[in-house]
């Protein structure tokens, strides 16, 4: 960490290395560093230099994000802090999520793709350029790809990979950002993107992981990559642990409780409402105004006076703003949330409780441990630079012997899973139809060339020298089937 003469943080290590390499001079970069290492600023360095040097000549910046909530937060930050530096007008800033493409005046945007600054989710932006083509002037665009590990996501990875394949080698600059990429996987991804990899596993603010089991408590810290230490067993269970933490003299607030489903979020929040009432009277009478009566607004109206809330993707705009404003003002003790709150949203928590770390697999009809990258992305919401006075604290549980055998994997925080390729020949019929319909390909040859340029093709080729031959055969079969089904001529 680089500090000034008064000891104040000037640059984190990842920021210093990015600037030294040339991220502010148009160089492609993949920055991999733990949460709260200042990766967002790495993207801002690129964006600011790109626009300040070339906006008069049509330079543009696109911020790609993983979720709508993150896109909204990023857009607000850029509008308030970034736009004045570049003298951007409200109608020159576009937020594209879901069904909406709006400027900073909250008006529908006409020619959105020509705006100097766009913030969009990966899927929305792919839809935008699929309809309009990868526009003329693409060499004047800088892309900041946040949460780029989505390229390995089981359900969304294929879409993200198609978009990145369209961009790589064709645009002015790509800056990828991630907190959770295995070293080998990150090296492959950087090479495919024609980017320099800069990577660190050292957190600017350390994390303490605590696995609580019936027989013992196991503790690990990000300050050393060593086996965990064992201690006496402690309270097991989210509600009991919350009571323990909030009664302790040691400050542990604010606390994020992450769940695997909205059902878990709602049930825990309602259960906690009983306990919060027991802990004391109302502590906050400053209630937000909700224009639309919903079950969520009714529940938040009961919860917020006791300084807790929940956060899911289903909150409407008023409800989301109410919760996030309370978070911004450091006016919540506990937030129950789905994993959307863990996906890059820049809120500072001292403690993270992971209520559940197994997810139901309907195909296997069993609960399975979530990928280590997803676990550590949630854990990384604790111990942020804005709270440098204390390490972050991560607590999770193993309630029985079966869980106790699987749970310790997350204490080895330096070990991250490597996801399989997300473009699979089995999906070629549907994927080929989409690529042909969008004009990405217009023939069997161009379809093969495009798919052969993907990250998945690169990885498969490393494992199997017959990959081009096998994929060519799969594409031929897909096109024959599409013709037989009369989807294409």
Image (cartoon, helix red, strand yellow):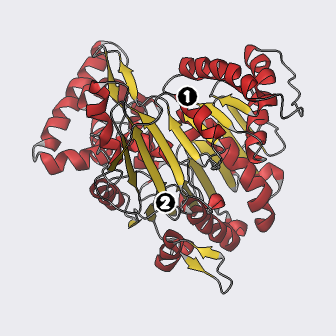
Q: How many marks?
A: 2
How far across and how far down the image is residue 218, in percent? Answer: 36, 44
Measure the alpha-carbon separation of dots 2 and 1: 25 Å
| Callout 2 secondary element | loop
Mark 1 Cα-neighbour bin, 10 Å: few <14, some 14–19, many ≥20:
few
Up-down relation of residue 26 to residue 66 (above or below): below
In which image quadrant can residue 276 be found? top right
Taking 363 as reference, is 88 left or right? right
Q: Quadrant of the C terminus?
A: top left
Pinpoint residue 335: horizontal percent, then vertical percent. Answer: 65, 34
Q: Residue at x 66, y 45 (%)?
A: 253
Q: Where 34 sits versus 361, above or below?
A: below
Q: Is residue 332 above or below residue 432?
A: below
Question: Could you tell me which residue is drawn at 79 percent across and 47 percent down?
Answer: 329
Q: Label 1, secondary structure: give it.
A: helix
Residue located farthest toward the front when viewing the structure as drawn: 232
- Compared across the picture, whether 47 is left or right of 395 comes to right
Quick one: label 2 or label 1, which is nearer the N terminus? 2
How dense is the environment of label 2, judged by Cα within 10 Å: few (below 14), some, or many (20 and up)?
Answer: many
- Residue 142 coordinates in the image, percent (x, y): 56, 60
Give residue 206's mark: 2
Tag of residue 131: none
The answer to whether residue 37 is visible is: yes
Residue denoted by label 1: 240
């Amino acid at each position: 960490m680089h500090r000034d003469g008064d000891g104040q943080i000037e640059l984190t290590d990842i920021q210093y290395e990015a600037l030294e390499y040339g991220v502010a001079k148009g160089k492609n970069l993949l920055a991999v560093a733990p949460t709260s290492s200042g990766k967002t600023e790495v993207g801002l360095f690129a964006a600011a230099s790109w626009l300040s040097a070339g906006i008069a000549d049509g330079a543009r910046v696109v911020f790609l994000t993983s979720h709508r909530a993150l896109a909204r937060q990023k857009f607000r930050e850029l509008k308030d802090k970034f736009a004045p530096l570049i003298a951007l007008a409200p109608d020159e800033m576009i937020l594209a999520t879901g069904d909406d493409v709006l400027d900073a005046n909250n008006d529908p945007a006409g020619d959105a793709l020509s705006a100097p600054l766009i913030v969009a989710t990966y899927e929305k932006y792919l839809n935008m350029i699929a309809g309009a083509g990868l526009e003329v002037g693409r060499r004047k665009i800088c892309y900041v790809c946040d949460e780029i590990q989505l390229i390995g996501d089981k359900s969304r990875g294929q879409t993200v990979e198609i978009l990145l394949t369209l961009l790589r080698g064709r645009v002015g600059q790509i800056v990828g950002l991630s907190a959770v990429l295995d070293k080998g996987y990150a090296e492959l991804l950087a090479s495919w993107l024609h980017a320099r990899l800069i990577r660190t596993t050292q957190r600017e603010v350390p994390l303490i992981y605590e696995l609580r089991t019936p027989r013992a408590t196991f503790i690990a810290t990000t300050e050393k990559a060593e086996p965990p230490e064992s201690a006496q067993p402690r309270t097991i269970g989210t509600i009991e642990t919350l009571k323990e933490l909030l009664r302790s003299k040691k400050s542990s607030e604010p606390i994020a409780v992450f769940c695997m489903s909205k059902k878990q979020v709602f049930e825990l929040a309602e259960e906690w409402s009983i306990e919060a009432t027991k802990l004391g009277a109302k502590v906050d009478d400053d209630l937000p105004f909700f224009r639309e009566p919903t079950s969520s607004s009714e529940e938040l109206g009961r919860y917020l006076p006791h300084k807790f809330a929940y956060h899911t993707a289903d909150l409407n705009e008023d409800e989301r703003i109410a919760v996030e404003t309370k978070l911004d003002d450091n006016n919540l003790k506990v937030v129950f949330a789905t994993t959307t709150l863990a996906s890059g949203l820049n809120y500072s928590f001292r403690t993270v409780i992971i209520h559940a770390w197994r997810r139901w697999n309907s195909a296997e009809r069993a609960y399975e441990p979530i990928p280590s990258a997803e676990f550590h992305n949630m854990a990384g919401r604790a111990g942020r630079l804005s709270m440098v006075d204390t390490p972050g604290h991560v607590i999770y549980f193993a309630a029985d012997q079966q869980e106790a055998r699987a749970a310790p994997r997350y204490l080895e925080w330096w070990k991250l899973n490597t996801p399989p390729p997300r473009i699979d020949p089995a999906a070629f019929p549907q994927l080929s139809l989409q690529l042909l319909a969008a004009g990405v390909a217009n023939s069997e040859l161009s379809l093969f060339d495009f798919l052969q340029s993907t990250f998945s093709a690169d990885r498969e080729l490393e494992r199997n020298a017959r990959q081009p031959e096998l994929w060519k055969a799969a594409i031929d079969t897909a096109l024959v089937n599409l013709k037989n089904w009369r989807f294409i001529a």
